[in-house]
């Protein structure tokens, strides 16, 4: 199976991981799994929070976003850019 697939033990075939809005994937080795940009809310896949959204569980955001340290509720923010030196 590729990174975006799981093995359906009943059919012995590789199946694409579910996207947001679809039921979570579950088999003998997976429990409540979704594509990499989503999480399982217990029954269905939901998109991970993005910039400006409240962090999932106070810690998780989409991709390389970080959960900001501002007052509650914590929100997803881009990682800080690199320091750049400019010579005049």
Image (cartoon, rainbow, N blue to C red):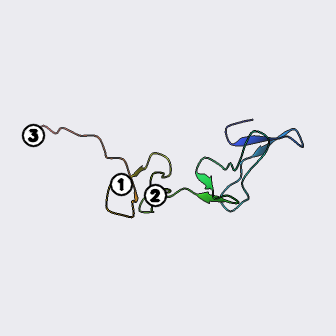
Q: Which residue is mark 1?
A: 68
Tag nearer the camera, 2 or 3: 2
**Drawn side of residue 10 relative to residue 54, left or right:** right
Left or right: 77 in relation to 82: right
Residue topped by disc 2: 55
What residue appears at the point 87 percent right and 38 percent down from the top-left corner? 12
Judge from the rendering whether residue 47 lies leftward or rightward of residue 3; answer left or right: left
Residue 11 against residue 39 in the figure, above or below = above
Q: CA distance from mark 2 to mark 1?
A: 8 Å
Indicate which disc, 3 or 1, sits on the residue closer to the N terminus. 1
Q: Earlier in the sequence, mark 2 or mark 1?
A: 2
Residue at image x 41%, y 62%?
A: 52
Mark 2–mark 1 contact, CB under 8 Å? yes
Using the image, determine if residue 42 lies above or below residue 36: below
* Cα distance in 3D space between marks 3 and 1: 34 Å
- Residue under label 3, please give it: 88
Label 1: element kind: loop
Q: Is residue 73 left or right of residue 13?
A: left
Is 86 or 30 nearer to us in this picture?
30
The spot of residue 25 in percent (x, y) is 74, 50
The residue located at (68%, 48%) in the rendering is 33
Mark 2 to mark 3 CA distance (whole Å) = 40 Å
What element does badge 2 sit on? loop
Query: Marks 3 and 1: CB-CB under 8 Å?
Result: no
| Quadrant (top left, top right, bottom left, bottom right) of the C terminus | top left
């Amino acid at each position: 199976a590729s990174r975006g697939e799981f093995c359906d033990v009943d059919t012995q075939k590789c199946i694409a991981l579910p996207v947001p809005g679809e039921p979570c994937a579950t088999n003998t080795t997976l429990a409540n799994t979704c594509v990499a940009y989503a999480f399982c809310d217990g029954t269905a896949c939901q998109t991970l929070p993005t910039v400006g959204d409240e962090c999932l569980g106070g810690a998780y955001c989409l991709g390389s976003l970080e959960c900001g340290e501002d007052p509650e509720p914590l929100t997803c923010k881009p990682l800080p850019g690199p320091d750049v030196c400019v010579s005049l």
